[in-house]
Amino acid sequence: MRKVVVSEFVTLDGVMEDPVWTVPFNTDEQNQHKFEELQLCDTLLLGRVTYEGFAAAWPKMGKTNTVVNQIRDFSIPEGFADRMNNYPKYVASTTKTPQQMRWNASLIEGPIAEQVLKLKQQPGRDILVLGSCELVHTLMQDDLVDEYRIMVFPVVLGSGKRLFKDNNEMKSLKHVATKTFRSGAVELTYQPAKKE
């Protein structure tokens, strides 16, 4: 069965919202690492807000292999944008219609848990979730996350949407890997602990 992998950028205080704060810490090393992560999957699972932002940005990046933003532009590995643009995307939204889906995307219709389980049973590589805060919270509630890859950046924001909400029920996770980057960011990888 395929794995659902949640891959997030977070601050030291757990904020994941609008990660423009990652840009000062961006390095070629991290970009290459994220490209390698992308190569291990063949499907993206996104919430509406992340889908809309990505669909507006990634087609342009495919032409230049450059991420343009208000802080500092930076290059991404050759082929990164092509994968982002060409992978099938499944989008969780209560406001979009199937006819509004673009950028090689399909709307998840029906209960999210049921549809994600169907995706996991299809042949293929990992299903990657990027950003998509509300969707991630739903996946966590339904125990559909097989792996968390949390890249923690050395910055504190004080407020914003958090990866783990205050009212989440307790879940035990098993640490499986740590990767430290020269920028000061650290990626922590966890999997749900097996229930005894």
Image: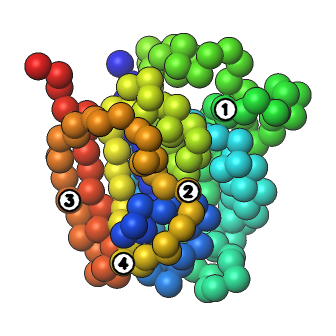
Q: Which mark is residue 170?
A: none
| Of the image marks 1 and 2, the number of the one nearer the N terminus | 1
Q: Residue at x 39, y 67 (%)?
A: 13
Q: Nearer the viewer, mark 3 or mark 2?
A: 2
Question: In the rendering, at what x and y percent does residue 135 appear?
Answer: 57, 37
Q: Residue at x 66, y 50 (%)?
A: 50
Residues at circles 1 and 2 in contact by the CB criterion of under 8 Å: no
Q: Which mark is residue 161?
A: 2
Residues at circles 4 and 2 in contact by the CB criterion of under 8 Å: no
In the displayed orientation, state which residue is furthest to the front.
167
Which amino acid lies under the numbered mark 1 shown in the image of this protein?
Ala
| Of the image marks 3 and 2, the number of the one nearer the N terminus | 2
Looking at the image, can residue 75 be seen?
Answer: no
Residue on which disc 4 sits:
154
Check the picture and name the quadrant holding the C terminus: top left
Disc 1 from disc 4: Cα separation? 30 Å
Q: Which mark is residue 178?
A: 3
Check the picture and name the quadrant holding the N terminus: top left
Q: Residues within 10 Å of mark 2 (few under 14, many from 20)?
A: some
In the displayed orientation, state which residue is furthest to the left.
196
Q: Nearer the viewer, mark 4 or mark 2?
A: 2
Which amino acid lies under the numbered mark 4 shown in the image of this protein?
Pro
| 98 shown above or below 165 | above
Which amino acid lies under the numbered mark 2 shown in the image of this protein?
Lys
| Of the image marks 1 and 3, the number of the one nearer the N terminus | 1
Question: In the rendering, at what x and y percent does residue 140 appear?
Answer: 43, 33
Disc 3 from disc 2: Cα separation? 24 Å
Q: Nearer the viewer, mark 4 or mark 3?
A: 4
Query: Is residue 51 toward the left or the right of residue 9 in the image?
Result: right
